[in-house]
Image (cartoon, rainbow, N blue to C red):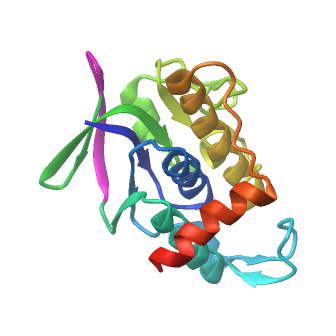
């Protein structure tokens, strides 16, 4: 059973995958590559002066891959179902079981609706500050939880919040993903050796 299944491969989904995989949790991402980022150009993303959205997506995918996330590119999720001990994510002809699910499907809220997540009066998925929905261990991120406030930085932050909350549940205490120059050398030195 996979620890974290992530439905959607835009900034929120890839951020959740990156944080989960970097910190030792199996992360499985289903990505149809229909992100709005392909229509975007980033000028307001901290640390990036100017970057085409498709180039950003290529870098974000590579980061998730480098940390060991398993991406199923062009895999459309047809259903997400809560089971007794987690979730079953269905694609055409295949199913995957996971302990946690992160919904990162932009403005499409169909998966959250079929899963039985609560919605706000504004018609967005109701989440707490950790991005957890009313369904235990199911998280919603980005455009799903914001009425007309769609932005790459916000979405990536939502994905990170979801992953950090999952890590807190899994590892105990309040989990922090904070690298220092010495740990960054270990992390990135190891990645450079693998590339």
- The residue range painted magenta reads 76-86
In this rendering, the answer to whether 144 lies above or below 136 is: below
- State the residue in front, 148 or 106: 106
Residue drawn at (47%, 80%) of the image? 195
Question: Can you give x and y, in whole percent of width and height, for residue 58 in the image?
Answer: 55, 78
Residue drawn at (58%, 20%) of the image? 172
In this rendering, the answer to whether 194 lies above or below 145 is: below
Question: Can you give x and y, in whole percent of width and height, for residue 57 in the image?
Answer: 58, 73
Question: Can you give x and y, in whole percent of width and height, for residue 33 in the image?
Answer: 45, 70
Question: Can you give x and y, in whole percent of width and height, for residue 7 in the image?
Answer: 42, 49
Which residue lies most toward the left here? Answer: 93
How many marks on residues? Answer: 0
Q: Main secondary structure of the magenta part?
A: strand
Based on the picture, tell me whether residue 45 belongs to the magenta stretch.
Answer: no
Location of residue 30 by image quarter: bottom left
Left or right: where 121 falls relative to 132: right
């Amino acid at each position: 059973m996979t620890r974290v299944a992530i439905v959607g491969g835009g900034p929120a989904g890839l951020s959740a995958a990156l944080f989960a995989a970097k910190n030792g949790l199996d992360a499985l991402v289903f990505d149809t590559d229909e992100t709005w980022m392909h229509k975007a150009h980033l000028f307001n993303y901290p640390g990036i002066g100017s970057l085409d959205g498709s180039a950003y997506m290529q870098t974000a995918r590579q980061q998730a891959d480098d940390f060991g996330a398993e991406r199923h590119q062009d895999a459309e999720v047809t259903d997400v179902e809560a089971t007794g001990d987690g979730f079953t994510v269905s694609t055409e002809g295949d199913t995957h079981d996971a302990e946690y699910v992160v919904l990162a499907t932009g403005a499409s809220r169909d998966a959250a609706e079929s899963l039985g997540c609560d919605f706000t009066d504004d018609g967005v998925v109701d989440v707490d500050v950790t991005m957890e929905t009313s369904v235990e261990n199911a998280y919603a991120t980005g455009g799903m939880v914001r009425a007309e406030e769609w932005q790459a930085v916000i979405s990536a932050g939502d994905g990170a919040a979801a992953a950090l909350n999952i890590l807190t549940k899994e590892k105990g205490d309040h989990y922090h993903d904070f690298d220092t120059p010495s740990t960054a050398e270990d992390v990135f030195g190891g990645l450079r050796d693998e590339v």
